[in-house]
Amino acid sequence: MGSRKRHTAEARKEANKTQYFAKLNNCPTSPRKMRLVAGMVRGMEAEKALYILKHAPQEASIRVRKLLLSAISNWQQKNEGVRMDSVTLYIKEIMVDSGRTLKRMRPAPRGMGHRILKRSNHVTLILGNKVDEKVDESNIK
């Protein structure tokens, strides 16, 4: 590996140490349905998003809720001494990418077959801390 790639990879690893995220790969829901649920909670505080996802009628909201709980758990592991009440966590980014597509055939009249596409997706959720970001903005000025 070249030195430029190694330096950028090291910088990316350092940035990931300060971010709190969770990933869900190969979720058997179409990306379009998942993006609707992701759009509902994008930019919200974590507690409010948990409440909305708990009471949303979509099936994808169950998976996004579990993913958000996992990201909060990752935050708690990295910040053991900090209380959850004193920090305002919010959903900084939530990305839904298409995953693999399973191709299936369904019998049709006259000896034909229709193709069925069973889509899946990958979801990445990144948490942010409003208190830390306000401190960073004041240091920049």
Image: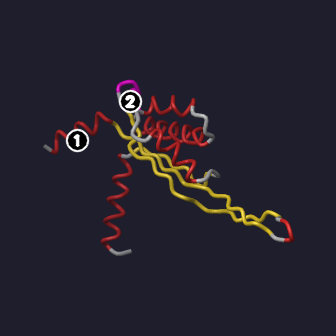
Q: Please tell me whether mark 1 or mark 2 is closer to you in this view.
A: 1
Instruction: Pinpoint residue 78: horizontal percent, then vertical percent.
Output: 41, 39
Taking depth in this image into account, of 76 and 118 the one nearest to the observer is 118
Q: Amino acid at mark 1?
A: Asp
Left or right, 135 with reference to 101:
left
Taking depth in this image into account, of 122 and 10 the one nearest to the observer is 122
Residue ID at (13%, 43%): 141
Marking on residue 5: none
Q: Residues within 10 Å of mark 2 (few under 14, many from 20)?
A: few
Left or right, 102 with reference to 73:
right
Left or right, 34 with reference to 90:
right
Q: Residue furthest left?
A: 141
Report the residue marked by disc 2: 81
Residue ID at (79%, 63%): 106
Coloring basis for residues: secondary structure
Instruction: Pinpoint residue 26: horizontal percent, then vertical percent.
Output: 60, 55
Residue ID at (36%, 40%): 128
Residue ID at (34%, 54%): 14
Left or right, 32 with reference to 88:
right
The span picked out in magenta is: 80-86
Report the residue marked by disc 1: 136
* Picture layout, residue 55 above or below residue 68: above
Element type at marker 1? helix
Taking depth in this image into account, of 130 and 120 the one nearest to the observer is 120
Taking depth in this image into account, of 92 and 79 the one nearest to the observer is 92
Say which quarter of the image contains residue 118.
bottom right
Q: Residue furthest bottom?
A: 2
Q: Residue furthest right?
A: 110
